[in-house]
Amino acid sequence: MQIDNDRFREEINKELSSQTRPTITVLSSLLAIQDKFGYIPELAIDVIAQYTEHTINEVWGVASFYPNFRFTKPGENMLEICWGPTCHLAGSSKILNDIQEALGLDGEGETINNKFTLKYNTCLGACSQAPVISINHDFIGNSTSESVLEKLSKIDPKL
Amino acid sequence: MLHYTDLKELANDKWLELNSGNKPWIRVGTAICGKAAGADYVLDKLKIVLSELNIDYIIDEVGCLGICFAEPLVDITLENGRRVFYKNVSVDDINTIIDDSIVENKFNHSSLLGILTSNVDNNAIGENDLPDLNELPGIKYQKKIALSNAGNVSPFDLYHYVSQGGYLALNKAVNHMTPDEVIKEVSDSGLRGRGGAAFPTGFKWSFLVKSDNPSKYVLCNCEEGDPGAYNDKGILESDPFKLLEGLTIAGYATRSSNGIVFIRHGHDGPIDRMENAIKRAYDEGLLGKNIFDSGFDFDVEISLTGESYVAGEESALMESIEGKRSQPRFRPPFPAQFGVWGKPSNINNVKTLTYVPDIISNGSNWFANIGVQGNKEKKIQGSTGTAIVCLSGNIKFPGLYEVPMGLSLRDVIYKIGGGTASGKELKVLQTGGPLGGVLDSNSLDIHLDFDEMKSAGAILGSGGIIVGDIETCVVDLTRVLVAFCQYESCGKCFPCRLGMEQILEITERMVKCESSEYDLELIKNVGQNMEKASLCGHGQLGYGPIRSALKYFESDFKSHIIDKKCPTGSCVQPMISPKNTRPYGILQINKGGE
């Protein structure tokens, strides 16, 4: 167990030291870890604190503030649905409702088989193509419940 | 050491070659609007088909031409510089489009949008029968300054930008003007900040000049979390070099040492293109030491923030650059004395900085004569230049349009936007982002003008205009705006943290028709307290949308509260919106531990 932890610590350290932008902060380090692992492992908080010479509390403070950080492993695929005003007017709440029903969810989170993580997004930034969703950061505009379900069933045929 | 004339010559040669028609030059719009419409797949398929047909070609990804409704947009330059545009291209259309343009020169494909013949010897071909792209309303009424290169040049290629007049202004500024002359030129142009506050840019820069600290920062704010607006991201994706040139000129004018471009993490398109632009500028000596042999040194880097709307507020932005929670600071001291890392700093919006190169190349008079002129005697500031409007919602031709200031909302919605997509009567316009306001159909004669919009209870703000037709329930729309503001409240000061939650609860009651008339008093009371007591613009402006909604759509609210029904019947849908009280992560951890 100790060996595993050491190895993981090393992996996190490697990720932190390979940041290419000139200014390295707690936030930039957290973003790098989230990009690499898809979440912030608890061990990473400790490593980031050492690496950036901050206290663990300070690192937690930043990590808990931004809602894009998560602390448990996400599902295999990330599904984001926009609920901003433009998408809302274009019918995104119906899509959200239908998709949640199909995935067996009643809010943000992971499906039971861990195939998907559903995340609400305040604005994906492609308002001219509303309603917009993204699957693993691939944007899909002018979507409907049917077209989203079709895409999802390509990933998980049981849907 | 590279001189401007050498750079320009190289760029011109390259541009001429592209337009010579020796090989077809294909441009595909892959800004965020293009990607959401499937442009990446179109791009891949184009490459495959052209290779299969053994056609020699050049292909470039470009930004957004503004007519987002036509995405994915494919633009093919043939012999004689003739440009053929195809709209809403799908993967299945590629073969027939290549036949129609490159192989057979027929130009009668069903996806043909228009042709540009500016460089063409008109007698040679019967162009008159073909649709002229410049006659398309979405193109015709635009006046492009900040977006002049958008959709025309590759955002990855510095030479494209230079061939279109890029870096002329920086060379002029650093080698032929003093910093004070640059500031005067920007002041005289009447340029006002495009981030929402409309503060005079030249005046703002002059605050930073007063400090003789050797290390000073100019920050470019591309946080842009506003739903309904993607114009800053559009600039970064379409023409990042222009922004970079503007930022460098701002650095020279304020005698700063460093520039930072501030973008939200996750917007990969804008980040990658900006990152590449900065790298290319360093390669060519347009950033770093001794720019254009003038002795001026300037460094630029990118800083990423997490998901936080308040990070777009100037002092919260600086906290985020320092790697902390993006919560606003108490002021004074103001950023010009104590900014990022404690150094004097200046913050401008992306759009503001992107106007700067053209103001320096063409002079302040040229810019001041576009849009709404001010009047010093009457103390009217005016709104000079253009407005970059992001038209979305229930609109026939959504897009990213750059139009002269002073155009009426009616012209924007009907001449350019083509009216509502549903064909039904227009009911509501939501302008200036979630902290802006709502307007009704009687407000269509208001002009795009900072002061006129503000006095009508809406703001031009980020430039987003969301359109709703007669079936839109304004109470429900207001609830979504409030839900956004509540979700994004940073939690530092209690008037905003608690107030947002209260007004969200009240608007939710209203939508559910479970409200009483007392709630109208209550929401006003809470809102006005937020306005007076909040630390930053988020709380101070958060009541704005509700106030304007109550002003223009009182009957909608009354029928929910008194008649207990929605006049449009459209707000029966489930109310889904995340409820968030920061810190958010702790709640997640607790959930995980259950």
Image: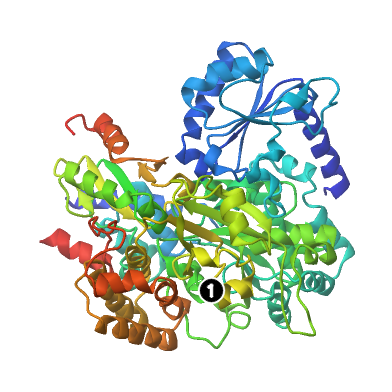
How many marks do you count on the picture?
1
Q: Is residue A52 above or below residue B69?
A: below
Q: Position of residue B230 (x, y in %)?
A: 52, 54
Pointer 1: what residue? B314
Give me the residue at 28% from left, 70% from top.
Answer: B559
Can the viewer see residue B71? Answer: yes
Side of B272 relative to B451 (left or right): left
Left or right relative to B582: residue B215: right
Res B153 seen here: no
Relative image position of residue B378 (x, y in whole percent)? 76, 84
- Mark 1, chain letter? B
Residue A40 x/y as whole percent = 30, 56
Q: Nearer the viewer, residue A68 or B387?
A: B387
Element at badge 1?
helix
Looking at this rendering, what residue extends furthest in the left direction?
A: B594
Residue at x-position 69% and y-position 55%: B146
Query: Which quarter of the picture shows residue B582?
Result: bottom left
Residue B343, compared with residue B159, is above or below; it is: below
Q: Position of residue B248 (x, y in %)?
A: 71, 61
Q: Residue at x 74, y 47 (%)?
A: B284
Q: Residues within 10 Å of mark 1 (few under 14, many from 20)?
A: many
Image quadrant in which you'd find residue B299: bottom right
Left or right: B206 with respect to A34?
A: right
Amino acid tagged 1: Glu
